Image (cartoon, rainbow, N blue to C red):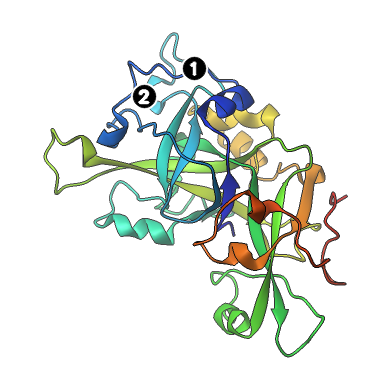
Amino acid sequence: MCGRYAQARNQHELQLAFDFPEADESAAPDAAAGGTRSRPPLEELAPDYNIAPGKTVYAVLGTPPGEAGIAGGGHRGPRSLGTMRWGLVPSWAKDPNVGYKMINARSETVAEKPAYRNAFARRRCLIPADAYYEWQLLPDDRPGDAEAGTSPVTDAGHQRRKARSRKRPYAIGYADGSPLALAGLFERWRDPQRPDDDPAAWLWSCTIVTTQAAPGLSRIHERMPVVVPPRLWPMWLDPAAEPGDLHAALSATPVDDFTVTPVSTAVNSVRNNGPQLLDPAAEPPGPHSPEGATLF
């Protein structure tokens, strides 16, 4: 799964990294307004080294679905930046709090699940991250041993194993420091309790697509976020992309370029923040864990 990540770049740095035009402030909705039906808000976010579900995050967008196929609107690739709440709220949801249960979408079922299939077909984004965090389990009854973390969706004993283990965190990102482009989906939810002229009537939200962990990462956790390599950004963001191409992208995470760094358990608490969370841990990794270097 992907339940925590770091992102410290500002809007200008993201614009350079993803090569999209400078934002047209005259066309963007007021940040305090919460966006509109056609466009998400764009708030200036402070660097955050411990992003948790429910927070407002940056998302890189391509051509809006409504402009796909329109003459002059067929741009492929990164086009703009928006801010959204992490935790997808489907358009048909009765309560926006359902988003806290939908921070991740499984790649194996994303095209069929009612909560995700429409977004997967037409509303995809890239969620920039400096690194994402994952936790390995250290069973209390087996000192010196380690187990891969699991998800409650796939492991019936997840809560029991978690309760009987300590957690060792790792930060995973590109070895050269480039931003990860996490595969994301987004939705727009209309608050029925607000009048039509209320600028906060629309909630924009997103989720991160996950897949089975690659062999070099599976010793830490059984799942990992899908990371879209730069060559596939235009296709992933194209609302008219073919299903076969999209499914190919779900298995194209460039893990050969990743580095795995054991970090302090300070990241375990969402109350802690700051660049020090990405510093290598003072204690070296154990005998069953990665060595804090490139994977392959």
Labelled disc at residue 183 = none
**1 or 2: tag closer to the N-terminus:** 1
How many marks are shown on the rendered structure? 2
Report the front residue among 187 and 35.
35
| Residue that numbered label 1 is attached to | 22
Q: Quadrant of residue 157?
A: bottom right
101 displayed left or right of 276:
left
Q: Residue at the location (65% across, 61% down)? A: 134
Q: Is residue 101 above or below residue 173?
A: below
215 displayed left or right of 151:
right
Q: Is residue 123 visible?
A: yes
Q: Residue at the location (59% across, 70% down)? A: 154
Labelled disc at residue 66 = 2
**Secondary structure category for the residue under label 1:** loop
Q: Quadrant of residue 281?
A: bottom right
Farthest top residue in view: 72
Which-is-in-front pick, marks 1 and 2?
A: 1
Q: What amino acid is at disc 1?
A: Glu
Q: Residue at the location (28% across, 35% down)? A: 32
Report the front residue among 217 and 65.
217
Q: Residue at the location (16% across, 47% down)? A: 192
Image location (x, y in percent) of residue 103? 47, 55
Q: What amino acid is at disc 2?
A: Gly
**Secondary structure category for the residue under label 2:** helix
Image location (x, y in percent) of residue 135? 66, 66
Q: Is residue 11 above or below residue 50?
A: above
Image location (x, y in percent) of residue 17? 63, 27
Q: Is residue 295 above or below residue 231?
A: below
